[in-house]
Image (cartoon, coloured by chain):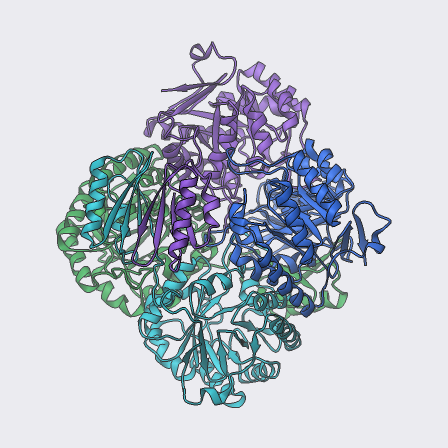
Chain colours: A cyan, B green, C purple, D blue
Amino acid sequence: MIVVMNIDATKEQIEDVARRVEGFGLRSQVITGEERSVVAAVGERREEYKQSLETCPGVAQVVPILAPYKIASREVKPERTRIKTGSLSLGNGHLGMIAGPCSVESEEQLLSAARAVKQFGATALRGGAYKPRTSPYSFQGMKEDGLKLLAAARDETGLAIVTEVVTPEDVPLVAQYADVLQIGARNMQNYRLLEVAGETDKVVLLKRGPSATMDELLLAAEYILSAGNPNVILCERGIRTFESHTRFTLPLASVPYLHAKTHLPVVIDPSHGTGHTYLVPSMAAAAVAAGADGLIVEVHPDPSCAMSDGYQSLDFAQFQEMMELCQRVANAVDKSFGAADTAAVNGSANGETVST
Amino acid sequence: MIVVMNIDATKEQIEDVARRVEGFGLRSQVITGEERSVVAAVGERREEYKQSLETCPGVAQVVPILAPYKIASREVKPERTRIKTGSLSLGNGHLGMIAGPCSVESEEQLLSAARAVKQFGATALRGGAYKPRTSPYSFQGMKEDGLKLLAAARDETGLAIVTEVVTPEDVPLVAQYADVLQIGARNMQNYRLLEVAGETDKVVLLKRGPSATMDELLLAAEYILSAGNPNVILCERGIRTFESHTRFTLPLASVPYLHAKTHLPVVIDPSHGTGHTYLVPSMAAAAVAAGADGLIVEVHPDPSCAMSDGYQSLDFAQFQEMMELCQRVANAVDKSFGAADTAAVNGSANGETVST
Amino acid sequence: MIVVMNIDATKEQIEDVARRVEGFGLRSQVITGEERSVVAAVGERREEYKQSLETCPGVAQVVPILAPYKIASREVKPERTRIKTGSLSLGNGHLGMIAGPCSVESEEQLLSAARAVKQFGATALRGGAYKPRTSPYSFQGMKEDGLKLLAAARDETGLAIVTEVVTPEDVPLVAQYADVLQIGARNMQNYRLLEVAGETDKVVLLKRGPSATMDELLLAAEYILSAGNPNVILCERGIRTFESHTRFTLPLASVPYLHAKTHLPVVIDPSHGTGHTYLVPSMAAAAVAAGADGLIVEVHPDPSCAMSDGYQSLDFAQFQEMMELCQRVANAVDKSFGAADTAAVNGSANGETVST
Amino acid sequence: MIVVMNIDATKEQIEDVARRVEGFGLRSQVITGEERSVVAAVGERREEYKQSLETCPGVAQVVPILAPYKIASREVKPERTRIKTGSLSLGNGHLGMIAGPCSVESEEQLLSAARAVKQFGATALRGGAYKPRTSPYSFQGMKEDGLKLLAAARDETGLAIVTEVVTPEDVPLVAQYADVLQIGARNMQNYRLLEVAGETDKVVLLKRGPSATMDELLLAAEYILSAGNPNVILCERGIRTFESHTRFTLPLASVPYLHAKTHLPVVIDPSHGTGHTYLVPSMAAAAVAAGADGLIVEVHPDPSCAMSDGYQSLDFAQFQEMMELCQRVANAVDKSFGAADTAAVNGSANGETVST
């Protein structure tokens, strides 16, 4: 930590800061500049004393030097994590493709979607049974009936199931049916939910909140990791900016940035990230080119009848075309693509972290 | 709803949209422009069909005409709501002043803060017992022990207690101790929590999420209101923007905007809204001048030793000065100021909505 | 400057950075942390070497310690600047009030506005003769004819004239007529325009660009100041954020922030800052409470017929009411209010900086 | 245009709006809803009357239906524009690659960069001779000496020259040397500069301002187009958001969005769009996958010694690697790549628009 003092900080204030730093068990080093002094605090234990020093008399600013997250960090684990659960495998050079409807609406809707996305190359099925909706008057999901349909779709197609959990008390039930627990953007900082998901042995797909910084996203992952669950997939799904021609702004630079900071795999959601069907295929291809470890895409048998998110869902023909495009781009950037090799995962009923 | 068709939409597509509109039980009216046609859907029931129409072939855009929230709307209840619970009264021309430490840290810390803020004019005490923290390695609050200290502070000072609840299962316990349940910015769209808080008879202070639109904030309030609880206070605490010299950007125009759209009272949090102690008093005064119905401010006996948010907390002398400033500005804008008249509320153990 | 090295930076890389620092004539000091090292560069000359060090092998980050602007800084001139030109006086505890139409449209329109704003307490007249418009198909201003009308309005009312200049070559002509050259938000980083305005003896009102940081605003002011013109008024007129219920988001914390960093006066534009007539009076009052040194407000005889910005203009009755409200708030925060004392400025034909 | 009336608008107010609409020569149609009425204005001439109607008594909102730009619109010219000037050809399926240093610093620096970027596949050379710099104390460019060096580099390598012009009066001089006039992000709304550039016969590369909407970008292009110059290249270079781990946020969805709205080609600047060398190659590849018509990338012989933007510049080896990656991705998305076929353009000394 670097403690920057005010221009007019007194010698006493500088010494007081240095004393506090030593009091924390850190080593202090005062650097006297021509206009300002700074106090370096060496041996810091990440953030713990930053706040206290910020409020000391004479202090202008405290600059942290180390990242605030640990287990998520590449400093701790330099090699990339690869995550496998059922048919889904992603990370460290392998692309996973998660597709399906926004909401589970009926057996027919879900099964037809599951068959189609499987046919065109998806390696997991998404579908919401518990829906967090902006308005209390909107469709809130089929709940456990939806979970049962998802399990049936897995039985038929072999696709791993990705489904959202919105509150801690639902985690045990959802975990009975799902392969991957999705934690949505609105719940990225629902810490109880993160903790409870961290106590399961399920893979967790954690979506970035629309105004979360990268540090906040990685600290949210840290809640899950520090509860004992190493199987975390990060998901960039767009941030809220002044742009109104897209629903959110999708910053693909998150992919190479996160790859530099964390070993966890990063998937992109071009459906929420754009909010318009016609923008999804280009951004899916761009995500693959940017190095994403996977995609999560909304696909519906008939988007114009969808109970949620129809305006950003692909129909089957559009999905097929997108997959062909992504396959070509994946080849161009030397990524493998496709379902997990079942032989390789037969010892793991649940998510398994493979580091290479 | 106004459905804007594409420039090259066919006659069949336009007729199809009109048919769908009629199918929803609405009246359709086609307006043929020189370049584009639009279909007006009359009798709409707020958002319910918007999504479906957005995905119809040939549709460029759907423009909603009515607000998506109902109970929160001034269209439904034109007169301003005034909320009273214990010593706290705010709304419709009366200012409430909520102050206290970010976190409850100890009996001594809390009681000294309670006495001081009461002395200088606060009408409720804030203090967090359950703390949602960005990092899993930060102090997470004193939990039920903190609630007990808050109740003790109320017993001594008479101040109503405002404290945060972070997960649905904690609501019953927190409601045993608190007068006002605070739902923090990170949980503004934690819909289960909103619903459970809506089932209590406690006043709920709902903070705007840092990237929430006004419609999203009012729809979050609608979750509480539609669950049966009319006692909602809205809180603007700043939004996340590109500005980095403040922790968040505090848009005070939220006050007159919300007053135009909703009858619910609006309080401002200049502590989180700026993130720096030295900016708090000016923004508190500005909030009062903008017509806010109250303030919620962080005050700590010794901010440099605070376990959270010290960098934005006022000490007692700063709080006193701020209160004197706010009192003068309140007089200038014809707002009354101060604790609830106890005689007026002696029939109401819990929050009571008074409309005038 | 603090140069933060990568975790895996080699001893050679650290020494190379230290050598470069010394090569710039600065003193280097290496601090060896447990995980990372940092190199402090003492005696820095603001930003000049930052960029070079950022690209050295092994460097993670360079943290500047000093502000990049000089003449604008309170470090250089701690006392607040008060600016006077003709009837306008603002800064250091005195409020100036600039009002008038967005565009000069006709003699009748301008003179009636000038008389009205003068009557209700304005101390300068605004009006655009050169209009930067988003669309090439919109009204572009009356140009020199508009300037002549502004001069006529000054002759009749005695109000100082504030008018925009949009390109360097127009500066001499506009300076013949205007008391204050306004540089609009779109031109905040039109550096040639800043330089040319800096070579005049006119007061310059510099508006913040909608995505400019505070450092960028102060560096834009520095262009004018370093060209020799000390008479700069800063204007906060709102930033672009995700909020769509206001035209821009008006961050009033800019006022106390800028007062801490610079001696230059700060005025607020609640018309552009909100974009809606009904929000202007509340935000004007809030700006005064926040400590602003003045306001600039759009007033039109008949906003529904205005050729630009009618949706955010006040009519005369609304302006009168706003002024009475602002007067009361100014009294509450101990600010004086009103036209310059002509006796005090009779020696200065042009803008004059008064420091107290 | 759709004029949405207030809920409590009177019959007289609605009739007044309808009368005004007819007064503009438009056809009005009143739609009486259950809660609100709207007035449709048919035959509108884009934006011209919107503002006037917005200020009428009883009006809540005016919703434009048509795009405000004309010549830039695909409604006017559905086929994509391809632009060629010298060695640079881009648009309509063909990728142009513009590379070179941020600033022209010396003959040796520029020529070595020109040779290297040509060798690895660039089809135009960028280099700034006039530099708009945030600080008045930073290097401001070599000015005309820089232009001469750029011309010499073209003579040697055959690469077309892209260089920035910052003020209207410099346009004639810069146009003597340049093939493409770059208008930087800070000047996107410098309308005089746009007009003067629109009067030349040079290709204009127009960069999006960091807080400009897509409509504002296209209206800025409209200034150039409506002045008679059809040769406009749009450039997305990132927007300003709350993200601080990248210098700007680069929204690649701008590419498919703009392709839907305009026939003009779209290039991406991954250097400014990320601000960090290590993020540039991934985002360059992603831009190609998203369908961009070209890239503009900063390349420097020794980024650690660059006088500007070194932290986001590639060295020659990095550029070579990036080009190989982009070539593979271009093949995957069926884009051609490379210098203009000189035979095809030998009749055009200057930029020429080719539509297919």
Q: In the image, residue B196 lies at what x, y percent?
A: 33, 67
Image vertical order of residue A100 relative to residue B101, above or below: below
Q: In the image, residue A269 lies at what x, y percent?
A: 53, 68
Query: A294 and A317: which one is in front?
Result: A294
- Using the rendered view, name the quadrant where residue D324 is placed: bottom right
Query: B192 and B347: which one is in front?
Result: B192
Q: In the image, residue D229 lies at what x, y percent?
A: 77, 43
Image vertical order of residue B255 relative to residue C314, above or below: below
Seen as rendered, the residue at the extreme right is: D347
From the viewer's perspective, tell me whether residue A27 is left or right of residue B288.
left
Count of numbered badges drawn on the protein: 0
Residue A317 in sight from this viewpoint: yes
Query: A255 and A211: which one is in front?
Result: A255
Query: C222 and A276: which one is in front?
Result: C222
Q: Residue at x 42, y 51 (%)?
A: C61
Image vertical order of residue B257 relative to residue A149, above or below: above
Q: Residue at x 54, y 25 (%)?
A: C198
Residue D127 in sight from this viewpoint: no
Q: In the image, residue B128 lies at what x, y percent?
A: 25, 57
